[in-house]
Amino acid sequence: MKRWMLVSLLSTVLGAASLQANGKFSGDMIGEYYYVAQNHNDSLVGNNGFWFRRIYFTYKNHLDDKIDVKFRLEMASPGDFTTKSKLTPAVKDAFIAFKEDFGKITFGIQSPPTFAKVEALWGYRSLEKTPLDLQGWSSSRDFGISFAGKQSIVSYTLMLGNSSSNKSETNKGKRLYASLGITPIEGFYIEVYGDYNGIDASSKDYIGQTFISYKSSPFRLGILYSRKGTIGNTNANNIISGYGVFSAKKGLNVIVRYDKMLDDGGKGEGISYIPFANNSPSNFVLAGVSYSINKRVKVMPNIEYVFYDTTGISPDLYPRLTLYYKI
């Protein structure tokens, strides 16, 4: 029995070594110490501890000059302050991409264009998700097929997906995604985005978004407006968000962000790690400092503060010390 276990282990190691020779393994880890200093839910006040908000393990391989594959596992703590469980891996990415002169076609579990560019330019997913992701308006992954291309200063992405995140598909509905980005001058980026879940779907909902960013050597800024609604219903939910990242000196950045929920259409108490109060427009503030120990390790003391438009709801305050490192 032990002999077969040893043979299996050696086969696994040799197989991994073979994959590594043609591809690349990498990983990211986001861990932190948190403290709930104030909260609309009195039972959470005083909660504190250590957790991993995300652990990623990724394998990429360039099969040839025109074909790439990517496989990523993700693990996360529950983040609801009540569930005790071990970190369980789930498939986050699994796709093959075909590159041609006219663009790139990708099939599998992948990032839709909803906030892929927004997240890249925000640059601090290690501190917090982008607004639509945070509020649960849209998932950071979907299973489908996409086409992305670029012509001069214009970039674009079209995608057809299950609208089931990285979970199994169980219905007839499909979501169509489209984004159009323009870089008019160096440093500026403007993106118009929309998606529509109306292909054989029982509820025909949509998201529209405009994002503008500017990046230079000492700072980068971004502002975003998003609207989510249902066809045939005049009521809709709206988010306005802005961020600034300022380089104080090499390796030291100051980060600020403000999200304004104009309605009460967010995920509320269901938001992991920072549950919002239900049924109230909210104001989210993040402020922090990022210090790079080296290219792979960042230490980021920060606070998250949420206050509400509805009278009588106490604000939420989370001092945190976040550690981000690449492996």
Image: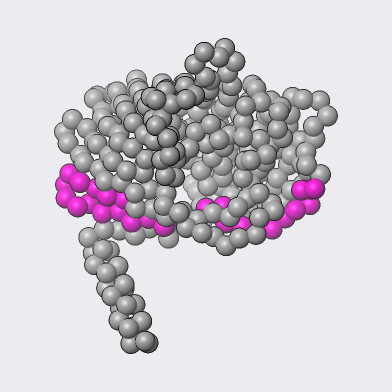
Q: Residue furthest right?
A: 312
Q: Nearer the viewer, residue 65 or 71?
A: 71
Most common SS among magenta residues:
strand
Which stretch did the figure color magenta?
Answer: 43-70
* Image coloring type: one colour
Report the residue at 20% width, 46% height from top: 67
Q: Nearer the viewer, residue 285 or 115?
A: 115
Q: Is residue 201 left or right of residue 235?
A: left
The answer to whether residue 159 is visible is yes
Pinpoint residue 218: horizontal percent, then vertical percent.
48, 35
Pinpoint residue 41: horizontal percent, then vertical percent.
78, 42
- Asked if residue 205 is positioned above or below residue 47 in the image, the reply reads above
Residue 216 falls in which quadrant of the image? top left
Q: How many marks?
A: 0
Quarter holding the C terminus is bottom left
Report the residue at 41% width, 40% height from top: 169
- Asked if residue 120 is positioned above or below residue 209 in the image, the reply reads below
Report the residue at 53% width, 20% height from top: 229
The answer to whether residue 299 is visible is no
Q: Is residue 128 magenta?
A: no
Quarter holding the N terminus is bottom left
Residue 73 falls in which quadrant of the image? bottom left
Q: Is residue 85 left or right of residue 170?
A: right
Report the residue at 56% width, 42% height from top: 128
Pinpoint residue 133: horizontal percent, then vertical percent.
52, 36
Pinpoint residue 110: horizontal percent, then vertical percent.
36, 42
Q: Is residue 102 left or right of residue 232?
A: left
Residue 246 falls in which quadrant of the image? top right
